[in-house]
Amino acid sequence: MPATLRLSGPLRDFNGGKPELQVQPGRTIREVITDLGIVPETIAVVVVNEEQQTKDYIFQEGDVVLVLAIIGGG
Amino acid sequence: MNGYAGRILRVNLTNGTFTKEPTPAALARDFIGGRGFGIYLLLKEVPQGADPLGPENKIFISSGPISGMLIPGGGKCDWTTKAPLTGGYASASMGGHFTAEMRYAGLDSIILEGVSPKPVTLFIDDDKIELRDASDLWGKNTFMVEKQFKDKLGEEYQIAVIGPGGENMVPYACVNHDYGRQAGRGGVGAVMGSKKLKAIVLHGTKSIPVADPAAYRKAGMALYKACKEADGLKQWTSYGTTQVVSWCDEVGALPTRNFSAGSFEGASTLSGPYMREHIVITDKGCFGCPCPCGKYSRMKKYNSNVEGPEYETIGLCGSNLGIADIESVAQANLLCDDLGIDTISAGNAIGWAMECYEKGIFTKKDTDGLDLKFGNVEAVFTMIEKIARREGLGALLSEGVKRASKKVGQGTEKFAIHVKGMEQSGYATHNATAMLLSYMTCDVGAHHNRAWAITYDLQVGRELVVPEKVARVIWLQNFRPMFDVLGGCRLQWVELNIDRDLYVPALEAITGIHRSWEDLEMVGARIWNLTRLYWARENEGFGRSWDLPPARFYEDAPKSGPTKGQITKFEDVNKLLDIYYEQRGWTSNGLPTPATIESLGLKAVFA
Ligand code: SF4
């Protein structure tokens, strides 16, 4: 069962405008977003199943992973 | 006029008179509100060369068409004045509930002019307007005064108040409101203090005419729905601006020990989740906000509470001073708010003094016996108090790092972290050229709010100096401050990523005038150019040299952290300015050309 990666706001541009994509378990969030063209450093917050995690978290089956872009800052 | 309360209140503090003037339709059409009104009125009404702390300076408090309306974040007002900190343009945005109440009292703006012969409070309750003796409040801290008014008059009264910092005219004194919201930067509180105005107390019961009530309800609800459904809502309301502490540390942007580095070994105990777990007791928001970012904290160690600290204060009064204890940072926040001084400038000034002490330029003789080393919490608390009261070393630091370093000399100017005299807010910019340019060209001094471009740096290459980066900064500078014109908060767009086009029908339903974001950005560009012209009018020789960043960012690379060994080359600093001026239509010395003034329709305004 794949995991779901959800991209917020402007990050969707890296996924053809779509908010979600399915990801096979076993890879880190860092690797997956890098493949999409997102520079991992631009991501401030990663939430896995409602818990904050690091970008080195490895996708598990059925995870819902939310990646938040900080486009504007305070 | 739809979308406007319809009146501007003029308060002459010298002779105690009030006049209400209709809000000019042309002003609303061309400058919309908020800081648009502010810069127009500043240019027109405050004479060239006015002393910021003298009777000729004025304060313009302005709402915008979405202030006090059922639009997410419609609780912001702009405070414009000639800045005592910089001698240029100051515009500070204040949240809370003040601006909504001001509109319900029938006022779009309040103009404060002259100087009262004795301390007074401006009291406004719908059409009842009075100046009341405030001699008994003079000298008191902000929280006590606000509570006193609330206890006596009721919770619905909204209060803006200065503390000893404002009374003593500390050039970075702020105005405090709602126990934790400020008109923070540039010294608006000092100007209020110079006018002997201790507080403004407001209450109103009127309504604002709306062009199309049904469309207004629909558009307002669409905005709320977008906020409530936003992916980032839970994170944002849990941590507010503190959610970026760890990230700033990770990318080398967290101001550390007077910006000598961008990463701090104690960052984990300053992070948003750590703070939430250890000291936050509840959330607090501004008028009508569906995503409250204010975090209300309890400091057991000090038996005290404060709204905050938010990211900027954690950066400037925490890592920048070598402090990793979140309770102590929150306590420093409390002291600054209660005494009425800006946490960003205060944190910078103390950081600069700590570096002077570390380098042996200051000894205990200069610090009134304090061991002013990085990390000394008690010394920080003492210095905050001394700054607000302008005592001992605090008197020097109260002047801001530009003036203080000029007085001290000995190379201390090189680590005075400011642009145009305003201390830099919470992002270290050793190697982030778009963010550096944002600070260099920001229209109030080194503040992040106009253009926050650091993620763009990271996405396209942090050291790159290319026209696209400059264009991004200019777009942000024209666009983001429009929230300060409309009288709303930008964070719903910034942090929740809601679609900015949702504001367009809301604004149209309220005012009856259709404005696309392109139209709004054009207003933003006009305002930006006017602020630039204002700086030039008030400061002889104003130009490129005023836009240079602190030397630290092009001479003094961090010795640790992710930006270790990295700086921006000075030739790139100049290249950034060359491209920026060209794209803005300014001369190579950074001044709007006659053709630019003409094309933006500003000739009549800046006559
Ligand atoms: S996001 Fe924060 S600053 Fe903006 S309106 Fe809400 S509480 Fe106020």
Image: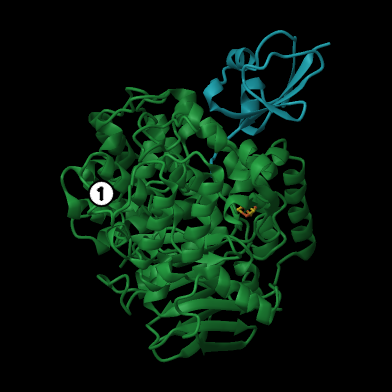
Chain colours: A cyan, B green
Residue bearing mark 1: B546
Out of B328 and B568, give the one closest to the viewer. Answer: B328
Residue at 51 percent of width and 88 percent of height: B131
Amino acid found under the numbered disc labelled 1: Trp
Between B94 and B405, the one lying in front of the other is B405
Q: Residue at x 33, y 80 (%)?
A: B55
**Would residue B518 appear left or right of B363 to someone viewing this image?**
right
Whether residue B106 is visible: no
Tell me the quarter of the image containing the N terminus of chain B: bottom right
Q: Horizontal and vertical percent for residue B172? A: 38, 61
Displayed quadrant of residue B557: top left
Q: Chain of mark 1?
A: B
> Quarter-wise, where is residue A13 in the image?
top right
Q: Is A31 situated above or below B418?
A: above
* Residue depicted at x 73% and y 29%: A51
B224 and B238: which is toward the camera = B238
Q: Secondary structure at mark 1?
A: helix
Is residue B312 left or right of B146 when viewed as pictured? left
Q: Position of residue B311 (x, y in %)?
A: 53, 44
For the question of whether residue B14 can be seen, the reply is yes
The quarter of the image holding the C terminus of chain B is bottom left
Q: Residues within 10 Å of mark 1 (few under 14, many from 20)?
A: some
Q: Looking at the image, is B383 positioned above or below residue B209? A: above
Which residue reaches farthest front?
B369
- Return the residue found at the far left: B410
